Amino acid sequence: MSTTDNAPELGYEQARDQLVEVVRELEAGGLSLEQSLALWEKGEKLAKVCEHHLEGARERIETALASVEDTTDNSQ
């Protein structure tokens, strides 16, 4: 089973690092069309994992900010 089969289990940094490597390989060229497509698909999966982690972080920040704003509003 490849790493991207467990992509949702990857941490943000792991997925980002693997995505960087995929981009490097694609930019280096010299791959067959099939290899390039496989790497592209792997990159798409990794990008989605990164996006998922960033959305979760954004939600946590928004929740924390809302909590701080509620506390500030109630203390006035």
Image (cartoon, rainbow, N blue to C red):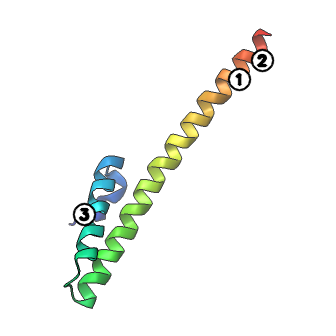
Q: For the residue labelled by badge 3, is the local secondary structure a helix, a strand or a loop? A: helix
Q: For the residue labelled by badge 1, is the local secondary structure a helix, a strand or a loop? A: helix
Dot 1 and dot 3 residues touching (CB under 8 Å): no
Query: Is there any visible trace of residue 12 in the rendered image?
Result: yes
Q: Name the side, left or right, on which 25 lies relative to 44.
A: left
Query: Is there any visible trace of residue 11 in the rendered image?
Result: no
- How far apart in space, not on screen, are marks 2 and 3 (Cα)? 47 Å
Q: Earlier in the sequence, mark 2 or mark 3?
A: 3
x and y percent of residue 15 in the render?
Answer: 32, 55
Given the image, on which type of amino acid does mark 2 rest? Asp
Q: Nearer the viewer, residue 29 or 63?
A: 29
Q: Quadrant of the N terminus?
A: bottom left
Residue at the location (27% across, 90% down)?
Answer: 33
Residue at the location (40% across, 69% down)?
Answer: 44
- How far apart in space, not on screen, are marks 1 and 3 (Cα)? 41 Å
Q: Seen from this angle, which residue lies furthest right?
A: 76
Above or below, 49 against 74 in this view is: below
Which residue, given by chain and number where applicable, does mark 2 sit on? Answer: 73
> What is the crowding at mark 3: few (fewer than 14 residues within 10 Å), some, or many (at least 20)?
some
Given the image, on which type of amino acid does mark 3 rest? Glu
Given the image, on which type of amino acid does mark 1 rest? Glu
Which residue, given by chain and number where applicable, does mark 3 sit on? Answer: 21
Q: Seen from this angle, which residue lies furthest front?
A: 28
Residue at the location (28% across, 82% down)?
Answer: 36
x and y percent of residue 29 in the render?
Answer: 23, 81
> Which mark identifies residue 69?
1
Above or below, 57 against 33 in this view is: above
Above or below, 53 against 73 in this view is: below
Q: Seen from this angle, which residue lies furthest top?
A: 75
Q: For the residue labelled by badge 2, is the local secondary structure a helix, a strand or a loop? A: helix
Residue 6 falls in image quadrant = bottom left
Task: Count numbered badges in the picture.
Answer: 3
